[in-house]
């Protein structure tokens, strides 16, 4: 993608969640960590695919809904 082309649907500010994932609340589940980020004023999150607490990659790959959204 060219650096001059920007998607019209992106809103911010956003945060990369990988640096905050942990075993304690609110950092141990997708819903909780997104609620925490929203409470700080963030409008979007970048979700790391390396932690199954946030996203189940196998489930997403098998999902008809996920496949149809791209």
Image (cartoon, helix red, strand yellow):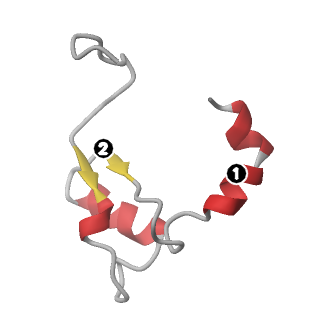
| Quadrant of res 56 | bottom right
Determine the residue positioned at 54% across, 72% down.
52
Mark 2–mark 1 CB contact (< 8 Å):
no
Q: Residues within 10 Å of mark 1 (few under 14, many from 20)?
A: few
Report how far apart the C-alphas of labels 2 and 1 lie in the structure.
Answer: 25 Å
Where residue 39 appears, as percent x and y from the top left, is 26, 60
- Residue 43 is tagged as 2
In the image, taking residue 24 as reference, residue 3 lies left or right, namely left
Quadrant (top left/top right/bottom left/bottom right) for the N terminus: top left
Q: Secondary structure at mark 2?
A: loop
What number of labels is visible? Answer: 2
| Quadrant of res 48 | bottom left
In the image, taking residue 70 as reference, residue 4 lies left or right, namely left
| Quadrant of res 47 | bottom left
Q: Nearer the viewer, residue 16 or 31?
A: 16
Name above or below for residue 60 compared with residue 3: below
Quadrant (top left/top right/bottom left/bottom right) for the C terminus: top right
| Residue located beneath label 1 in the image | 61
Q: Residue furthest front?
A: 1
Where residue 9 appears, as percent x and y from the top left, is 39, 23
């Amino acid at each position: 993608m060219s650096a001059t082309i920007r998607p019209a649907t992106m809103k911010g500010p956003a945060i990369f969640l990988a640096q905050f994932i942990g075993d304690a609340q609110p950092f141990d589940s997708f819903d909780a960590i997104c609620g925490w980020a929203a409470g700080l004023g963030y409008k979007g999150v970048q979700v790391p695919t390396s932690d199954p607490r946030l996203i189940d990659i196998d489930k997403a790959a098998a999902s008809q809904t996920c496949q149809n959204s791209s």
